Image (cartoon, rainbow, N blue to C red):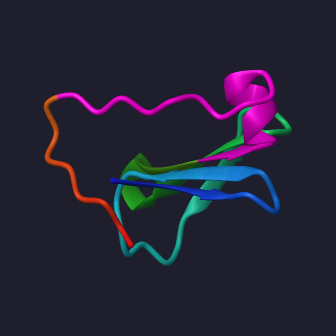
Amino acid sequence: MKISYEKETDVLYISLVEDFKQCKTVRLTDDIALDFAEGEQLIGIEIMDAREILGKGDLPKIVVQNLPLHVAA
């Protein structure tokens, strides 16, 4: 799983499964989209206007529990 944030566009993407090139995108709202691979496997979540949607102007803190942690450079 990988969580990435683009400050310039204010888009947060949660990649649940890596290395998928083709997917079907389903929009839940104007700002939230789900990406599905073949077999309806959820592979990613896109949140536009992330600062407003998730944190009312700020990005929330991330808490990781009981998962191995790897920090990307």
Q: In the rendered image, which quarter contains the C terminus?
A: bottom left
Q: Is residue 12 left or right of residue 22?
A: right
Q: Is residue 54 magenta?
A: yes
Q: Nearer the viewer, residue 22 or 69?
A: 69
Residue 25, x across and y down, in percent: 65, 54
Q: Is residue 21 left or right of residue 63?
A: right
> Which quadrant would residue 60 be assigned to in this image?
top right
Q: Specify the farthest residue to the top.
A: 56
Q: Residue at x 44, y 60 (%)?
A: 37
Q: Nearer the viewer, residue 13 or 52?
A: 52
Q: Residue at x 35, y 67 (%)?
A: 72
Residue 19, x across and y down, in percent: 37, 75
Reply above or below: 69 against 49: below
Reply above or below: 15 against 48: below
Q: Is residue 60 magenta?
A: yes
Q: Specify the farthest residue to the right.
A: 30
Residue segment shown in magenta: 46-65
